[in-house]
Amino acid sequence: MKLVFIIDPIAKLNPGHDSTVAIMEAAQTLGHEVWITEVHQLSVIDGKAWAILSQVQLVRVTLKEGKWVSVPQWYELSSPELRCLEDMDAVFMRKDPPVTIRYLYATYILELVDPQKTLVINSPQGLREANEKMYTLQFYSVMPETIVSLDKNIIRKFVEDKKQAVLKPLGGKAGEGILFLEPSDRNFNSIIEVSTHQGQEPVMVQRFLPEAKNGDKRIILLDGKAIGAVNRVPTGQEFRGNMAVGGRVEKTNLTPREHNICEVVGPRLRQNGLYFVGIDVIGGYLTEVNVTSPTGIREIDLLDGTNLGQEVIQWLVDTPHE
């Protein structure tokens, strides 16, 4: 198969951590062609989606002293060429958030790819509909108490009722901009003003879950079914468990409650064409659904001895699509 990955600049990726690189490595190992492009290299020509593509050859990471290690020159690119995306078997949209206007325009271009010829993972329409904070509200029955508002009074009343809360920007990623709130904080009003851009943008506010100190579990779902998980535990004075802010990873298994959450979320993901997704669970509550470029594969493979990248590619080979 010929596979395209729409990514951030490859030189900025961390091959020992990045799930996209793990999937590309797996595809290469299984004998498939791996091509890369970036959002700004997409075009529409004669009503079809095209892109400037470069084929990539990867040097796989190796396991040394309990971590993934790459060589300095871990990839080699062919000369770029303009290709119609329908000449490829699948396109993985793996551009990191935030979801900007440029990102949205890219999904409109990808909408022009004929699904009878080429599968786009994840669905362009699904990506537009599934803001990684707001989409979670589709599954409110398994969430902690949550509000979305830009009104300072509404936010204050919620925090006073819950005693402690967590504020999340709707467009954030990797724990960026997440703040701990208490009604007694003398900076409370300023925090709301800054976070809502002076009352111009809503934010999500969730009841704080004390279980967060025990970890924020990332569960990877493939076609709506859980295939692996990793627990991310806050370190030092940090209340966030995200790996990007220093969270420690540890091996984990899914609880019956977490299996239930996956069963609640999975059918809707499949319905929306969201094939590769990472959900976050704290204390038995769903807190986020990550659909743009969820990570965690490298850490799960390291701790569990799996190869989730190969599982993703094998699913792509074996599963009939539209």
Image (cartoon, rainbow, N blue to C red):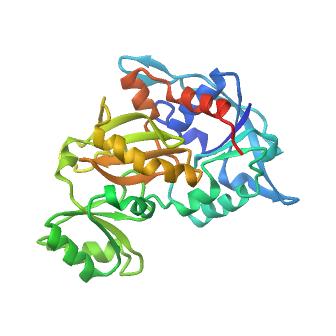
Residue located at (25% from left, 42% from top): 215
* Quarter location, residue 125: bottom right
- The image quadrant of residue 5 is top right
In the rendered view, would you say 194 is above or below 11? Answer: below
Does residue 274 sit above or below 255 in this rendering? below
Q: Quadrant of the N terminus?
A: top right
Q: Residue at x 88, y 59 (%)?
A: 46
The quarter of the displayed image where residue 3 is located: top right
Residue 291 shows in this picture? no
Between 85 and 140, which is closer to the camera in this rendering? Answer: 140
Residue 288 located left or right of residue 126:
left
Rendering coords of residue 33 (x, y %):
73, 29
The residue sitting at 50% across, 49% down in the picture is 267
Across and down, in percent, residue 261 comes to 36, 47
**Residue at the image position 61 percent from the left and 28 percent from the top:** 314
Vertical order, 163 against 173 (above or below): below
For this view, does 50 lie left or right of residue 74? right
Q: Does residue 41 show up?
A: yes
Q: How many marks?
A: 0
Percent of width and height locating residue 167: 29, 65
- Single out the residue that lies furthest toward the right: 46
**Residue 230 image offset from top left, x and y in percent:** 35, 35
